[in-house]
Image (spheres, rainbow, N blue to C red):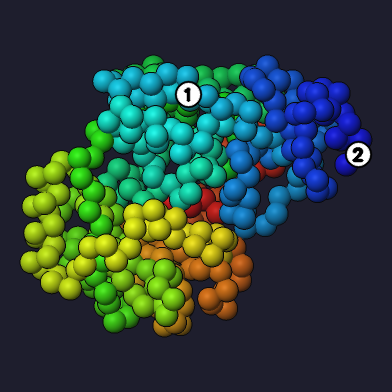
């Protein structure tokens, strides 16, 4: 490790290499330095793991064989923001918190609304394929990436897409890079589509007797066609493990008020102010650790999937998008594993074939992440 660190310091400078553990973290300051670092690593047969702030390393099912963490944290700047067009371009190390505040200043909404945005970088979120609290309305993050600049495993820079909403140039490789978990490239810049900002946000919570009741309430809310930003069931935020169904309404004031009346007419026990939007957004890290198990399936089967966990298991469920996170230490399940649909092995095979095409020398160590929805 000493030789590796010393070599990186000679290449990038002492200030660009950090980390007190066995694996040093290299933080190039630009595309040219990224390319040089990747080529240098390939020549020395080092394995690189691209990261942002490193907040999602626990998402890997098994610790990858890594010689150097390659961080984009020094690439942090909003390159362009067009409030009228609803687009924002930023370097990969820019925090989602900064991007969200910039967008809000121009009355736009940034998606995904991720957990603890100050700890999440743009490049890390896209590489992890991370969605947020607002996925129910806006879908996965990859749908809103208009363009991307990335460095490939041979050190070459590549561009996909552009900075306009209506753009049909080339192949949508930027969508392929989303969720690739550091296995195909290093993201250095991305352009995102934005949405109209909200005049009003209202968060209602409906108490539920147990998990089954919570899922039933969530299903009934979904039939009301309120276009909520989120419908989430959880028994994590309450100290006693009580179940609640949270419904987040957001948009124009008149629309939100009409939706609130419909919700209260159907569920009179719904209360506003029982929880904050920030706590609900950050519930995955409520105990400072990411949940140990993620469950995903079709909406019609998610309840059946959850039956394998004991009634007292602490979990966060987004039934309309058919995912659930099992909180660490609350079940006998093995740490950091996925319970995915039966045909997930086909996706894994496709990912392996892409890896062999984009990175035949196996320079990048990613590709075994949890692949969250």
Q: Quadrant of residue 3?
A: top right
Q: Is residue 318 above or below residue 330?
A: above
Mark 2 to mark 1 CA distance (whole Å): 35 Å
Q: Secondary structure at mark 1?
A: strand
Q: Is residue 300 visible?
A: no
Residue at 40% in and 73% down? 238
Label ID, residue 29: none
Residue at 33% in and 67% down? 233
| Residue 32 spot, x, y in % from top left | 68, 16
Q: Is residue 115 above or below residue 218?
A: above
Q: Is residue 318 above or below residue 252?
A: below
Q: Which residue is mark 1?
A: 78
Residue at 8% in and 66% down? 265
Label ID, residue 2: 2
Report the side of 189 relative to 99 (left or right): right
| Residue 162 spot, x, y in % from top left | 41, 18
Residue at 19% in and 60% down? 222
Q: Secondary structure at mark 2?
A: helix
Does label 2 or label 1 sit earlier along the sequence?
Answer: 2
Neighbor class of circle 2 (other Cα within 10 Å; few <14, some 14-19, many 20+) is: few
Query: Relative to the observer, which residue lies in front, 300 or 46?
Result: 46
């Amino acid at each position: 490790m000493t030789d590796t660190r010393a070599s990186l310091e000679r290449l990038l400078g002492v200030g660009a290499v950090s980390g007190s553990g066995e694996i040093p973290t290299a933080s190039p300051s630009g595309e040219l330095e990224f390319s040089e670092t990747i080529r240098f690593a390939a020549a020395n047969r080092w394995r690189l793991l691209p990261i942002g702030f490193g907040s999602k390393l626990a998402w890997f099912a098994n610790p990858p064989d890594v010689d150097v963490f390659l961080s984009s944290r020094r690439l942090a700047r909003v390159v362009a923001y067009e409030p009228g067009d609803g687009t924002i371009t930023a370097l990969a190390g820019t925090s989602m918190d900064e991007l969200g505040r910039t967008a809000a200043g121009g009355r736009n909404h940034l998606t995904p609304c991720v957990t603890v945005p100050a700890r999440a970088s743009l490049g890390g979120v896209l590489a992890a394929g991370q969605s947020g609290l607002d996925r129910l309305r806006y879908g996965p993050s990859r749908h809103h990436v208009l363009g991307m600049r990335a460095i490939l495993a041979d050190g070459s820079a590549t561009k996909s897409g552009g900075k306009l909403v209506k753009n049909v140039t080339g192949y949508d490789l930027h969508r392929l890079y989303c969720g690739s978990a550091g296995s195909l490239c290093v993201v250095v810049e991305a352009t995102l589509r934005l949405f109209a900002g909200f005049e009003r946000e209202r968060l209602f919570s409906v108490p539920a007797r147990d998990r089954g009741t919570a899922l039933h309430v969530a299903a009934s809310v979904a039939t009301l066609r309120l276009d909520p930003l989120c419908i989430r069931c959880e028994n994590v935020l309450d100290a006693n493990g009580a179940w609640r169904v949270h419904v987040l309404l957001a948009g124009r004031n008149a629309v939100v008020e009409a939706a609130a009346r419909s919700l209260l007419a159907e569920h009179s026990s719904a209360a506003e102010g029982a929880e904050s939007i920030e706590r609900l957004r950050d519930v995955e890290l409520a105990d400072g650790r990411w949940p140990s198990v993620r469950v995903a399936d079709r909406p019609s089967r998610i309840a059946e999937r959850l039956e394998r966990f004991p009634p007292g298991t602490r979990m966060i469920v987004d039934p309309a998008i058919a995912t659930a996170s099992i909180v660490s230490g609350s079940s006998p399940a093995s740490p950091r594993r996925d319970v995915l649909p039966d045909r997930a092995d086909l996706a894994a095979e496709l990912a392996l074939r892409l890896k062999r095409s984009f990175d035949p020398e196996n320079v990048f160590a990613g590709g075994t992440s949890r692949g969250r929805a």
